[in-house]
Structures are given as C-alpha cells and as structure tokens.
Image (tube, rainbow, N blue to C red):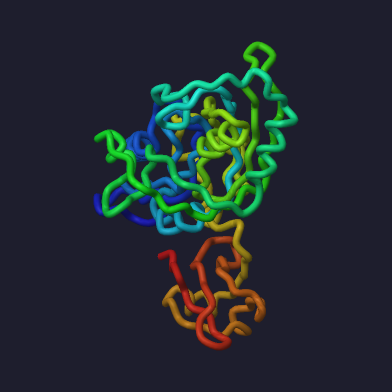
Amino acid sequence: MGRSRAGTPGIDGVCIIDKEPAWTSHDVVAKSRGILGTKKVGHSGTLDPDATGLLVLGVGKATRLLSYLTALPKTYTGEIVLGTETSTLDASGEVTATHTMQGVTIDQVRAAAVALTGDILQVPPMVSAIQIDGKRLHELAREGKEVERPARPVTVYRFEILDELDHDPGVFRCQVECSSGTYIRSLAADVGTALGGGGHLRNLRRTAVGGFTEADAVPLGVLTVEHLRPVASAVCHLPQVTVDDEIAADVRFGKVLERARIGVDPDHVGPWSVLTTDGHLLAVYVAFRGSTVKPAVVIP
C-alpha cells in the first residue's frame, strides 16, 4: 500500500456503487472522497441524476485505469412512456408535445426496438455532457439554445421490450445492452417517433457495467474501505499475462519488451494486463513496433 502526500496510507482499488436517484455522478465521487479519506477518486461513466444503478469508481492507483472501464458495454432497464415528449427525453423534463397512441401494440413497440438494434447513428440529446465548440450541451440547453449535434456511432447489442404495465397502459418496460456512449432516453424517444408519435424514458437503471452486476454493488451510505476491490479488477476483462520476478522488474521500469519474452499472443492486438505471480497488477501493455509491446500504464 502506497503513501499519500499527507503521510497516511494510500487507498487503491475499484468500488461499485448502487447510485440512488437525485445524486449526480459528481456528487457520488465527492461523497466517496470523504468516506474513503482520499481525493483520488473518479468514475468511469456518468449516470444521469434521476437514474439509479451501477456507478464504477476508481480509487487511488485505479484512477489511472478508468479509461478501460469507461469503454465497457453496459446494461440498463427502463420504461418507455408513449404519447408524451419532453425537453430532456426523460421524465425530468418539461412536456413539449403529446400524441394519441392508445392503439399501439406491444408487437409494434418490439418491432420498433428491433429496428434500433445493431450499429446505429445516434444524435446526442441537448441535455447531455457532450461538448460542442467547448461548451457542454446541457449548459447551452439551460440558456434556451439548441445546436446541431453530429450523430455518433453506437452499438445496441440487445433492445428487448419486456411487457406493458398493467396499471399504466402505454408504458413499456425495456432492457438494453449497449456500447458505451449510448443514450437510452434517445432510444426511447426514437421508438415513439418510429411509431408515429413520441415518447420519453422513465425509471432508468444501470444493471451491469461489463462483468460487474447489481450483486457487486453497495449503496453509498454503507461504503467502507473494505468494499474496495483490487486494482487489477479494473482491467480483469483484458487478456492477462503473468510474469516472473525478472520480467516484472523490467515491466516496473516501463521497458519495451518482445512479445515472446512477456508471453503475449503474437496475433493479438492487445491491450493486456500484466500481473505478478501473486496476482498484483503491474501494468497494461499495448502493441508496439514489430514484435514488441510497450506499457500504456505502469502501476507503481
């Protein structure tokens, strides 16, 4: 365990928070810093304030690995409300249009969802953290401005309409598995548009980030240092190589190594997590020139 600048033991690892509604991702990070006693806390992907579910935090040395967590696919559940459009595409916004859509069947909703599955181009909502010309879209939206947003490629691996709520006709529960950067509220709005009207999303919940699931998560109110997972868990989805003490010494110095020496697949493009024989993460290596690999991140 390292030492912080203040001389207290450093805290390193990954924790999975089950975020409550009304908390921003920044709020969760700020509160976690106080609970864990370290400023080195970051999250791997923003979750809307009204949404609940998994927010993956990197702590200490693990903050250097957040980019590998950000890219992981994610799974969500939510409810598509047909007939009402909102300014934010979700239930937090103001109603901007209403449509009569009582005749829409669940089979029609499922067909619209299937059409939005696969590799698609998605226009980010105005109320989002994406920057256009140096300013975040949600800041522009608060000023009453709407700007043209270029469509971005995303992948929807699965978009399943589970059922229609018995107590709330016209509201359909859905489950989505998608690439990072996909906006579920945009999918909900697009389903409404495809069905000849409009719609918005409510009760969004993130249920998985990569291999992390709800079973791995803890509420922020009970978070302690004991809930931290090893730093290596941040890259447990990457191909792994284990090295002996001699090679480990070279890895710690960030040396460029031959693929054969470090033991990575000659045909694989990487990246790879490099571990000691007792499972501690040393570095993440990536392909380099010819038959060599180099470090992208070295963990002190």
Left-right relation of 165 to 140:
right
Left-right relation of 86 to 292:
left
Left-right relation of 221 to 235:
left
Q: Residue at x 42, y 46 (%)?
A: 43
Count of numbered marks: 0
Q: Is residue 119 above or below residue 45?
A: below
Q: Is residue 155 above or below residue 97?
A: below
Q: Quadrant of residue 63?
A: bottom left
**Residue furthest out toward the top:** 167
Q: Residue at x 46, y 57 (%)?
A: 67
Q: Quadrant of residue 266?
A: bottom right
Regarding residue 70, the answer to whether it shows in the image is yes
Q: Residue at x 24, y 50 (%)?
A: 6
Q: Residue at x 33, y 45 (%)?
A: 147
State the residue in front, 66 or 126.
126
User: Which quadrant, please, contains the C terminus?
Assistant: bottom left
- The percent coordinates of residue 135 (x first, y second) are 27, 48
User: Which quadrant, please, contains the N terminus?
Assistant: bottom left
- The percent coordinates of residue 22 (x first, y second) are 40, 25
State the residue in front, 286 or 180.
180
- The percent coordinates of residue 34 (x first, y second) are 32, 36
Regarding residue 217, the answer to whether it shows in the image is no
Left-right relation of 35 to 256:
left
- The percent coordinates of residue 205 (x first, y second) are 55, 32
**Residue furthest out toward the bottom:** 290
